[in-house]
Amino acid sequence: MNFRYTRRRFMATTAASVAALSLPTGSLAQANSQVQTLRATRRTLDINGRAATAYGLENALGAQGLILEPGERFNVRLENALDVETIIHWHGQIPPNAQDGVPNAPLPALRSGEAREFDFAPVAGTHWMHSHFPVQEMQLLAAPLIVRSAEDQAADRQEVVLILQDFSFTSPDELMSNMDHGGGHGTMDHSAMGHGSGDGMMSKIMGKIMGGDHAAMSGTGEMPGMQGMEMDLNDIDFDAYLANDRTLADPEVVKVEKGGRVRLRIINAAAATVFWIDTGSIEGRLVAVDGHAVEPRAGRRFGFAMGQRLDIELDLPSAEGAWPILALREGARERTGLILATPSGQISRIGDLGDEATPAFDYDLAQESSLRATEALSLREATGGGMLMLGGTMSPYRWTINDRTWGDHVPIQVRSGERVELMFHNMSMMAHPMHLHGHVFQVVGIGGQGIGAPRRINGATRDTVHVPPMSMVTVAFDAGEAARWMLHCHHMPHLMTGMMTELDVTA
């Protein structure tokens, strides 16, 4: 097999840890017929000088992830080389329901040593793939899934993939067993947070967010008076925060050209960590979220929750230099990232702790409200859907949809082809990134604004939407294949305690 390695093709200088730079040559017909191999396997990482055992998704060259060229089908043989059963979900894709990658919905997980083939037309953009067993995702069984478009192929720019993950040397089972207890490893004390309280401050928050009053929000995205609730942002302190499997003690250095253009494809594959992306001295342009184009939005700091993706374009200075791209942990000082550097650029050491904690992400939904899809969903009356109440408590550690957990859930009933609107109403004091399988949706309402045609918001097209505490977000889509599709929170400990339901699409 031959491979192309040119500056403007794809990640020509990015580490082999991401997708192995595998860009097959040949005709489109050959690309469409070629079966690619992915192996779920164990691997060993060096995390700050300590050996760590983790899972991984290896391609045919032994590196992590998969890249598809324009017009190429998702034609993949998935092999389970683990000693446990597994199944991989193709996050952001719309495969036939039988290939969606959820255990026993409808196909069983792959047993150890078993293989299964998948074949469908992929959705272009920055996507990813991960185990749909939460404990396995927490052990890094995830990787990039990049589907390039014809526009990507023609563009004069370098592409760099950055996948972010959180890692603990403590097993997921032990982390979860400590969740109900204040203090101690892997936990934080939420006992004074007033979950479910109806005090005056909660009433103010409700009134401002539900009524769409953003004027009183701070420029950092925090509600006045909420500074005492930062501990609700992170309920696990992980041992490391990884960027392409590395920490800032030994970051990846991506070689770039003076004056070149770079497109960052950034994936939040963390189990329970929201990040801000900080582009430092270079102003970036946010051009896509969750793999779908938005009208460009300039800035140096953009946030995203678990399961979401950001595509950011940068125009590099014409001089030699090095430019860190940092991921800052929400509500804390920890950070990770990589460095873009010209061949003669001087690279300085960067500590893994910032000078101060970063603020909460998008409490006022200011970023989400500012995003506009380049292709708006057609105006059409919604005949299906409803409100989903997101709730939960830290003790006992239990997170719910409509006050129910998985197994006791009531599926959302819709018909294939009908316009559906779902309002996520978060009444808990933690944010929830809500992910719908088998569909993409458009954000059409923030709080009480933009609900009902023709006043709806032309928001971003997504598959995962961040719903902050005490807020409402409404999404719209046209129901797809008649099947049962998962709808769940992408915060893994929340999912593990049952924060999942189904969209039951009938013919």
Image: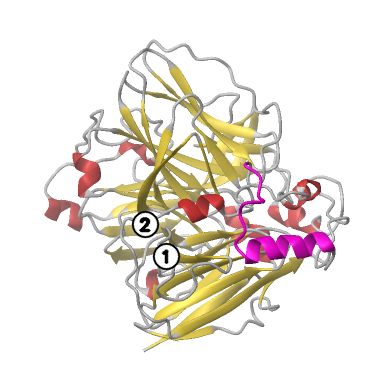
Q: Tell me: residue 325, above or below residue 286.
A: above
Against 333, is 42 above or below? below
The quadrant holding residue 60 is top left
Q: Which residue is mark 2?
A: 373
As shown in the figure, which amino acid type bears the numbered disc 2?
Ala
Q: Quadrant of residue 157?
A: top left
Q: CA distance from mark 1 to mark 2?
A: 8 Å
Mark 1 residue crowding within 10 angstroms, few (<14) / some (14–19) / many (20+): many
Residue 369 lies within the magenta run: no
Q: Quadrant of the C terminus?
A: bottom left
For the point 60% across and 72% down, which residue is it? 500
Q: Which residue is at a point 23% across and 29% down the rendered structure image?
A: 6
Residue that numbered label 1 is attached to: 442
Residue placed most toward the observer, 339 or 169? 339
Instruction: Check if mark 1's residue and mark 2's residue have beta carbons within 8 Å.
Output: yes
- Which stretch appears magenta? 200-219
* Viewer can see residue 137: yes
Residue 443 lies left or right of residue 5; in this view the side is right
Mark 2 lies on a secondary structure that is loop
| Secondary structure beneath label 1 | strand
Give percent across and percent down for residue 501.
Answer: 58, 76
Q: Given the image, on which type of amino acid does mark 1 rest?
A: Gln
- Asked if residue 205 lies in the magenta stretch, the reply is yes
